[in-house]
Amino acid sequence: MIDLLPSRSASARNDILSGLTVALALVPEAVAFAFVAGVEPLVGLYAAFMVGLITACIGGRPGMISGATGALAVVMVALVADHGVEYLFATVVLMGVLQILAGVFRLGKFIRMVPHPVMLGFVNGLAIVIFLAQLSQFGVAGEPGWLAGTFMQGSILDVAWLENTQLYMLIGLVLLTMLIINFLPKLTTSVPSSLVAIVVVSLLVISLDLDTRVVGDIASISGGLPQFHIPSVPLNFETLTIIFPYAVILAAIGLIESLLTLRLVDEITESRGRGNKECVAQGIGNTVTGMFGGMGGCAMIGQSMINVNSGGRGRLSGISAALFLLLFILVASPLIEQIPLAALIGVMFIVVIGTFEWSSFRVIRKVPKSDALVLVLVSAVTVATDLAVAVIVGVIVSALVFAWEHAKQVHVEAREDHKGSTVYAVHGPLFFGSVTSFLDRFDPTLANDDVVVDFAGSRVCDHSGLEAIDTLAERYLNCGKTLHLVHLSAECKRLLRKAGSLVEVNVIEDPRYFVAEDTLG
């Protein structure tokens, strides 16, 4: 049974009205992303409907909105251009299967590996991307930069700007929309301020017959129900070699953006979603979408923020958004096509302001320089390339910084005990980054004939650490000296046993050896 509302106190009215607001904002974005991918507008709208409906029903994060996204669209361009839209549908089906497998094998938990600076960079980068995507609406239709020109990899310098009167009209309507959204909640919260702003600005434009661009100027959104359609591609190995690389990339981008958006909504709503369940839902949504002529999708941070800020908390908000979108396609397209783009741009600008972590400017001076670098780097890479690359780069840089800092923490204390043995006490983690520093601390020619290396204050983390121990043992044994390795952790002993003949250390002593000798004194 589907739990439509997260709690008994949740308002169905808020969810439905919020869903209507989201659906209105989904229309131009789905159309624009379809153009980016090089497919028909209905391909993007069907994806927004089907992925949004399925994830809203069975996903792991009530209140999160999914649909066609630009992060996926920019990857699809080459596939559609080289092989056609049928290969795109097949790729989306395979993408969904991979995402289902990711959820089944519980890979969603690895999103915990994303550091907070990467999360901040992701949020800021997407806010900038959303902002740049809206700037393209200030360009002249049909000229370079219009719609897709500033999105992701374009530049605002590419836009052929509107003439003065139209430009000022557009800016004025955008500002009016933003003012309504900002100040209406101070008077009443009974209806979403974004919905009121869209309705007011639309009525103003229609009643005064103002010359400004409307949704219908982008493309017609009229259509029928999506039809079941098995992708018309050859079922052979050659097809698999074409679609598999794209499917892997799309699946990774979709899951990363969805899981990071899930975390963001978790923080805003102070609740916790289920990452692996969301992976399965995204996979089912994309598999079905590919079978019904959709371009696939994932969680949308902008629409999710609109939904949450408008009061949408339950599954009903996402379900109603998808059903309203279908209603627009089937019967209400003439009305929806009359909505001025200025109203939707204003809504998205408010989303940008609310999404961007302005506090990052304050904390960037207080956090370590490495974290500040990661934050800025992820933001820049998100804008310049795509989300998946940005997050992977951020995680890798963060991991390298972590390894570098911990590599400097290994140190060795040397002393001579009452038995005349040279005792080396190792402190700090022994792993690939610290093995060179570890080995440099030992000189067999300066030690007595009996040598004890005490690992009580250290932990051997990987195979590089085991090889370092093997190298150290070989050095002392070649010098004819007796070596005892004591207080190795249970994990290290298991690693040594598992390594077998790969590591030839045979001088491990019972950890009680050194303690017993020490107490005898």
Image (cartoon, grey):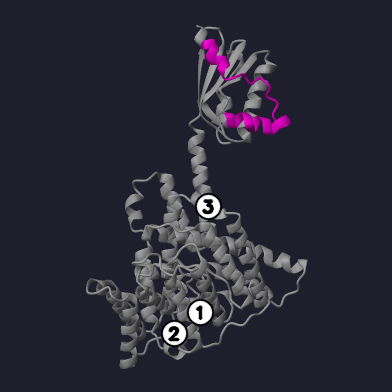
Q: Position of residue 264 (x, y in %)?
A: 42, 59
- Looking at the image, the residue that sits furthest to the left is 187
Res 154 seen here: no
The answer to whether marks 2 and 1 mark residues whose Cβ atoms lie closer than 8 Å is yes
| Residue 425 lies in the magenta-colored region | no
Residue neighbourhood size for the residue with mark 1, other residues' Cα within 10 Å, grouped as few (<14), some (14–19), many (≥20): many
Of the residues shown, which amino acid type is indicated by label 1? Val
Residue neighbourhood size for the residue with mark 3, other residues' Cα within 10 Å, grouped as few (<14), some (14–19), many (≥20): few
Which is more toward the observer, 164 or 282? 282
The answer to whether marks 1 and 3 mark residues whose Cβ atoms lie closer than 8 Å is no
3D distance between C-alphas at marks 1 and 3: 33 Å
For marks 2 and 1 on the same chain, the one whose residue lies earlier in the sequence: 1
Residue displayed at 28% across by 76% down: 180
- Choose mark 3 or mark 2, whichever is in front: 3
- Badge 1 element: helix
Instruction: Identify the disc placed on residue 215.
Output: 2
Residue displayed at 60% across by 30% down: 492
3D distance between C-alphas at marks 2 and 1: 10 Å
Residue neighbourhood size for the residue with mark 2, other residues' Cα within 10 Å, grouped as few (<14), some (14–19), many (≥20): many
Question: Label 1, on which residue?
Answer: 31
Q: Main secondary structure of the magenta part?
A: helix
Q: Position of residue 351 (x, y in %)?
A: 37, 69
Q: Position of 328 compared to 91: left or right?
A: left
Using the rendered view, name the quadrant where residue 228 is placed: bottom right
Of the residues shown, which amino acid type is indicated by label 2? Val
- Badge 2 element: helix
Of the residues shown, which amino acid type is indicated by label 3? Lys
Q: Which residues are magenta?
A: 490-518
Question: Label 3, on which residue?
Answer: 109
Using the rendered view, name the quadrant where residue 432 is placed: top right
Q: Position of residue 457 (x, y in %)?
A: 50, 25
